[in-house]
Every structure is written in structure tokens, then in C-alpha cells.
Amino acid sequence: MDRALSVAALLDPTHQVVPFHGRETELQTLTHWRDSPAPQASLLLHAPAGAGKTRLLQHFQQEHWDDDEHGRLLLIDDADRLAWQDVFRKLQDTLRHGPARTRVLLAARATGWWWSSTRQRIADFDHEVTDLELAPTLDDRAESFTLACQHFAKQLSVTAPDEPPPNIAHETVLDLHLAALTSVRGDPCDVNRTQLVRQLLDHGPATGRLAEDFLAVTTPNTPDPDLLARAAPRWPQLRQKLDEVVATNPAIALVLAPDSLRIAAEIGSQATLDHLARQVFRSERFAVDAIGSLLTRRLVERATSTLERAEMYGMLSARTMLCGLRQESVEASQNEVECYRELVRQDPENRPLLADALGDLGLRLINAGRRDEVLAVSEEAIALWHEIALDDPETTPQLASALEQISYRYQALGQDEAAMTAISRATLLFQELSKNHPALFRSDFARVAAAMARRFHVEGQKQHAADSMQLSIANWRVLAQEDPRYEPELARNLVVAATMLIDLSRAEAAREAVKEAVDLFRRLAVVNPETFRAELAGALVRHSQALGEGLDAELTAREAVMAWRETGDRKGLGAALLNVAQIARDLGAAEEAVEVYRELVAEDLVWNQVDLVVALAALVEQQLRHDLDDEALRTADECLDICHRLPSQLVDFFGAKLAPALQSAARALSDSDHHVRAVRASEFAVEVCCVLIPKTSPAVYPAAVQQHACRLRGAERKDEARNTAHTALVMWHLSGLDLDRQPDYADALTIYGRLCAETSYETDKALRLTHRAVEILREAGEPVKLEFALETVEALSSW
């Protein structure tokens, strides 16, 4: 080691001049954390500056971690100095490269709201998140001081002093080492921290952590603002200087490091608070950072009236929700509600403000995962709006809007009947308002009619869904005729209507609707290409899907690809390429789509990883169609590997497009006799559909289970397939649907019957069930499924 190390270098923890020692309790805790059964876990090690966090992190990694035995370890030192986006990128790398078992060890000086925000977001990666507070100094101070003296003396080629450690208020490990180095140099060390730093000022430049202490005792006229902010909590005399720096140049808030800005927000004067708030609240850079919430929390404390306090709590609730402080957003919203309750007690005219606040609280509770509390709050808001509307009919629009919102909350909670009731009431109210005041409420009626159509669609009421959507479109047409500014909204709703009509097997109506949307967007894109070119490209994709198969569909799909290329939107381009691959069976389009999504994943893994899975699943199908089985198997393995690394939150959020892609790939693999991978893909699809049960039609999960039974049958695992098919029947019976009107249920009966025939299991019962399937399918007009059912009846009758 270099004998000419400076004071800063001697005290630098990365040089380890004084070897690591002690911390047995903390190391034991970290070892238990390392060996816990959780596949992914994160831990924050926090302590004041100079407590030895960096030394402990390095020692743990070097002496207590083996990648082959323990998996991947990611160290994030000074985590509080990073913006969430930087932490986010590091965490994405753990998902991208694996292995499945991952530990993330962070270190920071303080906790507070920045950590709460980060902790709740890290949990979204399926990490078990904990924290560990590190004691500022070691238990055996005398031994530590003596050891430091010996090693510093060795570096400086002098004799180590033999004296006890000094008493330093609020001592840290760094303070003890500072005193040891001072003593080795022959200066008195039984003094305060300021004198210790002054005695070492002449022995080397102020760099690293020690620069903060040097700043405190030299107090230059133009200090580095980040150093100043970081030193201020440890040296209270610097706080006034920090206030002066901010007052002189308030825009400095835009260039301060995240932790420096948070410190200034937490310990700055009221004037500093005002300066920072004006800068931070105007900048989008801080939209998802906890700093806005920290400032707002302090501003709430200054509110002088109940109304002002209520408004500030509302602002605090919104900001905390945006930056991941979900539980804190609920608390702020609850405080807002209580303020408005007090105002209502003073004057009943404030009831609309309370009702709005209750509505916001419902959203915050959903966001925080506190679903059991949502309905009581939302229903209180509805009851309050009813009461208000009875006293003042002019508030009926607010009641209708509240009913619309609560319908979405019921839907999110899986209460489909309640959701339908609420949206139906909202639709009727807006319909009546639209008749009496068309200029004011026709657009609201058109919007909720479309929402009503979507509810009917989810519940399988095809005719009602089509009728409600046509009513919505009719109103949008009237609006567009009266005011051309509504033309974009008409076009967007025509695209939505076409998508729904395709699912309802009304192909001709779907083609007409989306063709009209394309014509509208073409005209709009000529006038304003930047705004409408992407929507035109999306409409072209839908038009090609409505056209089905054939040359027209292929040409339209390829035009959509060209349109997306012009926009520069790679996500849109990827989706359009997958559409071409499906319609034209184009292997090259599928390969290009995969490459597009790989590029997007390299930029943002979380938001694009599911799209890559979907693209890989589509590529598997195309490779099998082109007899590239070896390549298809490699692609399938990559696809399934990514699937098993997906955080549950991504499965929950994107599952609606993930499951169909995997089911389609599983079917193609099974048809090509690649049954092992077919079953794996189908198993994961079933898991996804199970997660989606609260958000999807009751038919989705049992349909997925019966498809899995087919994949097991193809793999010759027929007893397991039969049991799975029976599970599907049970799930159908628990769905609450009118099964006599469900062709998919009839198909499940047939599948179970066929498997019973093939395994010689309860054939008489299976024959009765299959007869029922025949009756349902005849009534539903499903010739293909009916033929399969009749064949199964014949097979069972031969027993």
C-alpha cells in the first residue's frame, strides 16, 4: 500500500487501512437475510454518516457471499443519493440477467419518506423488503481505537500511542478513527469533533466523506451546495448557510442531488421551503420523487384554516400516490376527509366537497391494496350524493359521475353485479340529462353507454353489448356533426366499437365501424399529422383484424406497419408487425417484432418485458408453421424463462394480453408434438388467468383450465388431463353464469366426456354430460364444437 496516503485516503473506507472488525450482530442478521427462503429480497442498511456502512457492505460481499451458492447480490451504496429512476434501472438489471435468487443490499444515511417510497416500489418486484439500523459506533470502542492507532501508525511509520479513546458527543466509527489518526500524529485527541477536524486540515485535501467535515470548520463563502446540504444534519451551524445559498439562487433546487434537496426541504427555514416549493412544483422532473410530498407535508403544517388544511391534504394525497407513497397517500386522504367532515358540521353546503374527498379516498385505498375498505368509503360517497341531489337536483350530474366511478371500483374488486347496477344507474341518469340538456350532457351519455357496453360484453350479453355500443356511437355522431371538434372522439369510439364487435362475431358491423374510423383519421392526419398519425396507424391495425384473412387484410396490416414507422413509435410498430405475422403468416415480421421489443426492453425492462414475451410466443407459432422446429423450441425456452422471472405485479397488470399469447403458442406446440413445452406454456397461462379472476369474465379461468386439459391430453397424460377437465367443470359451475347459454361450457363437458371415454372412467355419467353439451351447442349454433360433441357421444355409447 502507498505509504504516502493522504489524511482523506487513510480515512477512506474503500482503502481499508484499518481492517474490518466487530459488527458480529449485524453480520449475523445479514447472513439470516441472505439465507432466507425468499427468492428475491432487499434490505436497507441505514445509519448516520461515518458509521461504517460502506465498510460493512464491502466486507459482507467479499467474505460472506458466494455467487454460485447464494445467487446474485446487488449493492447500492448511498442509495438515498439516487433518484428513484436510477434505483429502478439497477433493479431492472436483476430481472433481466437473473438468476432467480436475488438479494439487493442498499445503504443510506437516513430513512423517511424517500425510503418508504422506494420500499413500496421495490416490493412491486416481488421483493421481501426489510431494513436494518446500524449503530453509529462499535460496541468495544477501546479495542477499535487501539486497532486504528496501530494501523495508522504502521502507515505513517511511527510508534502507536497507548491511550484510551476520547469521549466525543454522538460519536461514529469515523469520529473514532479521526481521533486515532490525530493521536498518531501527536496532536491531542481528547477534544471535540470540530477541533479534531481542524487539527487534520493541514495534512491533506478534503475529499470524500471528510470533505463535509472540512466544510463545516472552514465555512467558505461559496461552498459546494451538495456538500453543504449533506453536512448540515451533522453540523447544525451550517443550516443558516444552506438557507442563504437557496435564497440567493432558488433555481439551485433544479441541480441539487436528490438527497441534498430532501435535506434542504426537511431542515430548511420557512423561506427556504417557499423557494424550493416554487421550483419543485413547476418541474416535471420531480413528479415521481418524494421531494414534492416532503415539501407539501411541511406546507400543511402552516395552514391556518380548516379549508386550507383540507386542500393541502388533498394535494399531499395526490403527490404521495404519484411517488409510490401509497399508505401515506391514504393517510393524507383520510385527513382531508376529516377536515371536510368538520366543514360540513359547520355548514352543510360543504357536502359536495366531502363527497369528492371520499371519492378520492376510494382511489387511494385501491392504489394501496386496501380493497376491503374501498366499498364502505365509496358507498358513503354515493349516499351523500343522493342526499345532496334530493336537496338540489342541479347536482344530479355529480351523482351520475359518482355512480360511474363506483362502478369501476366494483369492477376492480370483482363485484360484477354491483358494477353493472352502478353503471346502469349512471347511464339512465346521463340519458335523462342528455334529453333535457343535450349540449351539456350528450358526451357524458355517449361515454357511459360505451362503458355499459363493455360491462355487457364482459358478462357475455352480446346483443345488449352491441345495442349499447351502437347507442354510444349514434350520440358521438350527433356530437361530431354539431361540432367537428368531437370528430376525434367519434373515431376513437368507432375503433373501440369495432374491437368489441369483432369479439361479438359481428364482422360486417366491425368492418363498417373501423372503416369509418380510418376515413376520419386519414382526414384528421392530413390537417394535424403529429396528433393523429399514430391513431390512424392504430385504426389501420384494427381494420386489418376486422377484415380477417385475405389480400385486403394483409395489405391493410402492412399499411399500418408503414404508418407506425412514420410515427417513430416502436411499441406501435412492434404490435403492427405481430399483426402482420398473424394475418400473413409472415415469419420475417415476427422476427422483426422480437428485435423491436428487445430494443425496448434494453431501455425499460418493466414496461416492455411482457410485450417481448408476447412477441416470442408469436415467433414460436411462425417458426413452427415454417417447419423451423429447432428454432421454435429455443424461442419457446427463452419465452418461458422470461415468464418465470416476471414480477407478479406485471402479470397482474399485463395478464390480459399475456395469457392469450401463451395459450396460442401452447396450442401450436402441442399440434407439432412438442408437448413438454406446450404443457409448460399452458400451465403458466392458467396461472395468469387465475391472477386475473377479479378483472375478467367468470368464463376466462375455467376456459383456460379446460385448454390446459387438452394440452395434457396431447402429452398422453390422460388421467391428469381428465382430472383437470373435471376441475374446469367445477369452475364453470362456480362461475355464476347461465351455463345453458355458454358454448365454452358445453365444450368443457365434451372434453371431459372424451377423456372419460379414453380412460374408461365413469362412462355413463360422462355420456349424460356430453348429451347436455350437444343440446347446448345445438341451441347456440356452434357446428364445429357440436360435431366434436356428437363424436364423443358415439365413442361413449360404444361402451
Image (cartoon, helix red, strand yellow):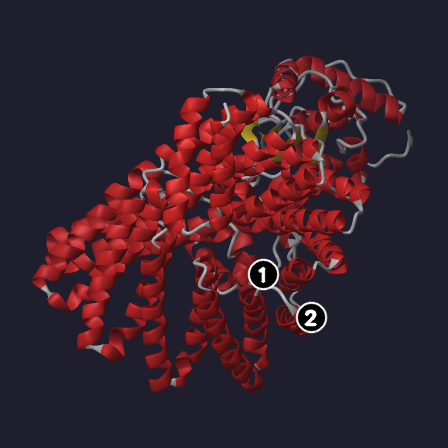
The quarter in which the N terminus is drawn is: top right
Q: Is residue 191 above or below residue 542?
A: above
Q: Nearer the viewer, residue 570 or 749?
A: 749
Horizontal relation, residue 30 to residue 288: left or right: right
For this orientation, the residue located farthest to the left is 391
Residue 453 coordinates in the image, percent (x, y): 35, 60
- CA–CA distance in space, label 1 to label 2: 36 Å
User: Is residue 304 visible in the rendered structure shown here?
Assistant: no
Residue 60 coordinates in the image, percent (x, y): 72, 23
Q: Which mark is residue 565?
A: 2
Mark 2: amino acid:
Arg
Residue 764: name its quadrant.
Answer: top left
Mark 1: amino acid:
Leu
Question: Which residue is found at the position 34% from the left and 66% from the top?
Answer: 447
At label 1, counting other C-alpha atoms closer than 10 Å, the crowd grade (few under 14, some 14-19, many 20 or more) is some
Question: Which residue is found at the position 68% from the left and 70% from the top?
Answer: 558
Q: Give the residue number, with chain letter if any, for mark 1.
A: 254
